[in-house]
Image (cartoon, rainbow, N blue to C red):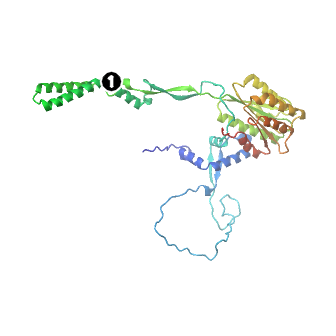
């Protein structure tokens, strides 16, 4: 048995395999650090790497060694200070875990936390682990630039690196049998006759010499058949097949009305940045449509969606109507997987909330794969939330709503909305 050890080096002479094993071993610590980092980061710093701290006590590894063996007799000395069951007070200050907190002390010892840096890709991998767009189905082949290589049988021509040794030797063996089979059968008969003459007619020199000459001729004829011929070579045939990929579009609807405070808008933007990073990292073919709304709605680009300072009153139905128009014009339901994410503080013109419910239930939700509504408010739910509850009851599999109170809730809510679901 042979072993292949990958000793390729990456940054700071750390083995790639060892780093992967290390990240897998301390996955829980890293996931917790990632969750905390997402909640405290600014909008522009959302996708960078992170510095991970692991307590020193958690990086110790078990050590296997041979014991002394045999029977042991040990005398443990007693002590004058402690008795069984007593609690020993923790040393003051420096006897902790080396975190730098506490006052100076003349006793105690500890170990600093182990700190290391994960890259941007590793950070995003942990951030979006086990997340997916629900109900995504392959509706149409989107292009021919994505292929997968599949086996397509055996060919007589091909690349030497793809030679099929078993098929080649099998073909060579069959050819040798076909070309030399008659001669081998004749050779066996002549050998049998020669053996008979040696036993029954040892003085028949003429016939014996003739048979020996025939045997030499047959052997020469058999030896002329090559062991391997170019005709025998067989190659594994590989072909490229287009990989069907799903066409999907995500509509991002953000409320920018006057009721949305700067803090509320910041939370909404951070939620949508998480969503945008998730889509672009996990899906190659997906369109993202950005819609901002107050009393009126407009389709905008990414830059304006996140950084425009436009504001006004609140009519949520304007965004839903615009989304419906865009769906009808550019995204046929028989070809596209349709998704939507809406973020608002729930404050809406009273007469408009029932209109939003009717638009969703009658015109939008029958075509949607998944629709999420996030209400950003520390107060009680607004009228729009209760109207959307009726939509959730009617479309429980494809509609979800969550509340975000503070920035710390963004990542947990995001994971709850897009958690990978088990297929029953």
On the question of residue 108 being in view, the answer is yes
Q: As drawn, which residue projects farthest toward the left? A: 203
Which quarter of the figure is the C terminus placed in? top right
Residue located 56% across and 75% down the image:
77
Check disc 1 and report the residue beneath it.
178
Image height of 288 relative to 86, above or below: above
User: In the rendered view, does 304 fall on the left or right side of 2?
Assistant: right
Residue located 59% across and 47% down the image:
24
Camera-side residue: 380 or 12? 380
Bin the neighbour count of mark 1 within 10 Å (Cα to Cα): few under 14, some 14-19, many 20 and up. few
* Residue 420 drawn at (x, y percent): 67, 39
Quarter-of-image position of residue 121: top right
Which quarter of the figure is the N terminus placed in? top left
Q: Secondary structure at mark 1?
A: helix
* Residue 42 drawn at (x, y percent): 74, 43
User: In the rendered view, does 12 fall on the left or right side of 337?
Assistant: left
For the image, the number of numbered tags is 1
On the question of residue 314 being in view, the answer is no
Quarter-of-image position of residue 169: top left
Camera-side residue: 154 or 412? 154
Image height of 329 relative to 161, above or below: above
Q: As drawn, which residue projects farthest toward the bottom? A: 80
* Residue 289 drawn at (x, y percent): 74, 29
Quarter-of-image position of residue 200: top left
Camera-side residue: 380 or 264? 380
Residue located 29% across and 25% down the image:
181
Camera-side residue: 275 or 359? 359
* Residue 175 drawn at (x, y percent): 34, 25
């Amino acid at each position: 048995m042979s072993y292949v050890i990958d000793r390729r080096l990456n940054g700071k002479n750390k083995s790639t395999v060892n780093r992967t094993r290390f990240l897998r071993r301390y996955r829980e610590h890293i996931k917790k650090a990632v969750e905390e980092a997402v909640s405290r980061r600014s909008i522009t710093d959302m996708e960078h790497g992170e510095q991970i701290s692991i307590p020193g006590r958690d990086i110790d590894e078990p050590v296997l060694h041979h014991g002394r063996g045999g029977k042991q007799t040990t005398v443990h000395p007693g002590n004058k200070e402690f008795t069984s069951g007593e609690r020993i007070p923790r040393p003051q200050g420096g006897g902790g875990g080396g975190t730098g907190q506490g006052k100076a002390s003349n006793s105690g010892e500890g170990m600093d936390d182990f700190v290391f840096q994960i890259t941007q890709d590793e950070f995003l991998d942990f951030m979006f682990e086990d997340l997916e767009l629900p109900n995504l189905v392959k509706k149409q082949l989107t292009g021919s630039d994505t292929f997968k290589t599949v086996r397509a049988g055996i060919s007589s021509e091909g690349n030497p690196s793809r030679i099929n040794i078993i098929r080649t030797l099998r073909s060579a063996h069959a050819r040798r049998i076909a070309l030399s089979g008659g001669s081998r059968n004749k050779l066996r008969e002549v050998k049998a006759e020669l053996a008979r003459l040696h036993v029954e007619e040892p003085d028949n020199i003429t016939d014996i010499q003739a048979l020996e000459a025939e045997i030499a001729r047959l052997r020469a004829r058999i030896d002329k058949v090559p062991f391997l011929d170019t005709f025998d070579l067989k190659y594994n045939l590989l072909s490229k097949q287009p990989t069907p990929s799903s066409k999907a579009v995500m509509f991002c609807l953000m409320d920018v009305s006057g009721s949305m405070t700067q803090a509320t808008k910041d939370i909404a933007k951070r939620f949508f940045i998480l969503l945008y990073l998730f889509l672009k990292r996990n899906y190659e073919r997906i369109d993202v449509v950005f819609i901002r709304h107050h009393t009126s709605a407009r389709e905008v680009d990414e830059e304006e969606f996140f950084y425009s300072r436009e504001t006004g009153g609140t009519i949520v139905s304007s965004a839903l109507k615009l989304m419906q128009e865009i769906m009808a014009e550019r995204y046929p339901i028989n070809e596209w997987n349709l998704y939507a994410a809406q973020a608002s503080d729930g404050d809406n013109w009273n007469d408009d909330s029932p209109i939003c419910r009717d638009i969703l239930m009658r015109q939008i939700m029958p075509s949607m794969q998944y629709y999420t509504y996030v209400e950003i408010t520390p107060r009680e739910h607004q009228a729009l939330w209760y109207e959307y509850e009726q939509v959730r009851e009617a479309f429980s599999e494809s509609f979800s709503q969550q509340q975000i109170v503070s920035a710390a809730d963004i990542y947990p809510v995001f994971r709850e909305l897009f958690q990978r679901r088990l297929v029953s």
